[in-house]
Structures are given as C-alpha cells and as structure tokens.
Amino acid sequence: MSPEQLALFWVGAVVADDVGHLARHPILARSPPVWVGGREPLRSLYARWLAGLLEGPVGPLDDELSEAASALGALAVVLVSIDPGSERSVNCH
C-alpha cells in the first residue's frame, strides 16, 4: 500500500470505530432522529454509516445549520438548565 492508501485506511478505521461506538450509545437506544453536523466529508460519512447501523432516521445537516449547531445546542442546554420544566425549544430560523 502507498502512504496515501495507508492514511485513507487509517482514517476509515478510526471513523468506523467511532461510528460503532456512537451507534451503541444508550442515548440512541430508542432510535431517535439523528442529525449529523461537522465538516464535510466527515459529516456525510458519519451520516451514511450511522444510517446503516441505526433504525431511526439519520441525515446530515446543511452547511449553514451545521456551522451553527454547536452554539444552538449549547443554548438549548442553558435554557433547559434555567427552567427544567419548560417546553421551550431553540428556533433555528
């Protein structure tokens, strides 16, 4: 194998292991919808591989929402921690 092929193999092995661990996490046991953020091409790769392992819907976020997802998630956590009984949600648009 060439150095480039070895590097690609290594990246694929690491991502496959990570996807496997994510798919077995208890938070995904009830097959909730999963939206995958992050940068391309990893976003599409994770979404495709997770979709093959999970029963619920899995899809990649678009570029704009993916860019804002971490901040929106953090905001949602803060809102729930301030008012745990609230039915508030974070409006993305």
Image (cartoon, grey):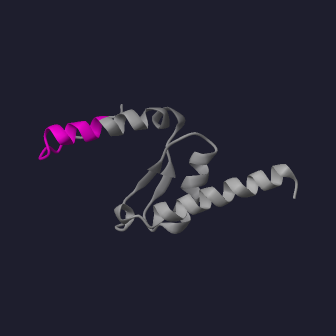
Residue 31 lies in quadrant: bottom left
Q: Which residues are magenta?
A: 75-87
Residue 67 percent coordinates (x, y): 48, 33
Residue 84, percent from left and from top? 14, 45
Considering the whole magenta stretch, tell me its main secondary structure.
helix
Whether residue 82 appears in this view of the structure is: yes
Answer left or right for 51 relative to 78. Answer: right
Identify which residue is drawn at 53% across, 41% down: 38
Tell me which residue sits at (21%, 37%) in the image. Answer: 79
From the viewer's perspective, tell me whether residue 28 is left or right of residue 45.
left
Indicate the quadrant containing the C terminus: top left, top right, bottom left or bottom right.
top left
Q: Position of residue 2 (x, y in %)?
A: 88, 53
Asked whether 30 or 21 is in front, the reply is: 21
Residue at 79 percent across and 55 percent down: it is 6
Residue at the image position 59 percent from the left and 49 percent from the top:
44
Taking the image as shown, residue 82 lies to the left or right of residue 54, namely: left
> Is residue 41 depicted above or below 21 in this figure?
above
From this view, report whether residue 23 is shown above or below residue 65.
below
Between residue 46 and residue 61, name the one nearer to us.
46
Q: How far across and down, in percent of the image, does residue 8 sit?
A: 75, 53
Please tell me how many numbered marks the rendered image carries.
0
The reply to whether the magenta stretch includes residue 22 is no
**Which of the image's four quarters has the N terminus?**
bottom right
Is 11 placed left or right of 80 in the picture? Answer: right
Furthest toward the right, the residue is 2
Q: Quadrant of residue 55?
A: bottom left
Residue 90 visible in image: no
